[in-house]
Image (cartoon, rainbow, N blue to C red):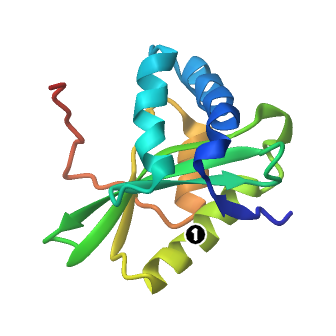
Amino acid sequence: MTAALRLARPDDLDRLMALVAAFHSESGIAQDDEIRRNALTPLLDGIPHGCIYLIGPGRAPLGYIILTFGWSIEFGGMDAFVDEIYIRPAVRGRGIATEVLQDLPKALAEAGLTALHLEVDRTNETAQKLYLRSGFKPRDRYVLMSKML
């Protein structure tokens, strides 16, 4: 399987909204469409804080991956978080996410990124296995903590 990636553009918003809503529903993330649209639109418009890639055919994407960029002293420069990655349930298990998580980091490293992070539900063993196979490692000394502003 070749998981072709294409940088999402503003005209992809409707397709992307449906995919993100499906991911949020599956993951138990309560968010209304207006908040979702307001969070996605700047990324599609090209702000420098992140980007969205559609996975697969442009007219009927198989999924998406959203990256957000930051800077880390510990990791020696620009880093990124996989904010969300989603593959449609009907095409899961075909190696699409594995291919994305192995190939995209190589391209990001060539562009100067020093580290790629993600978070995963502690009870989602399938996703944890995928991420471990893709080279991600748990940071046992650290706990990701958040504060809503």
**Residue 34 x %, y %:** 46, 18
- Residue 130: where, in percent of width, then height? 61, 52
Q: Quadrant of the C terminus?
A: top left
Q: Is residue 122 left or right of residue 19?
A: left
Q: Which residue is mark 1?
A: 104
Q: Residue furthest bottom?
A: 110
Figure quadrant of the N terminus: bottom right
Please say whether residue 29 is visible from this viewpoint.
no
Q: Where 43 falls versus 117 (above or below)?
A: above
The amino acid on which the numbered mark 1 sits, given as a three-letter code, is Leu
Place of residue 110 in the rendered image (x, y in percent of width and height, measured from the top left): 47, 86
Front-most of residues 144 and 2 = 2
| Rendering coords of residue 126 (x, y %) | 62, 40
Q: Residue at x 41, y 30 (%)?
A: 38
Q: Residue at 58%, 46% (x, y): give it.
A: 10
* Residue at point 53%, 58% (across, down): 132
Please state if 36 lies on the left or on the right of 59 as rendered.
left
Secondary structure of the residue carrying numbered label 1 = helix
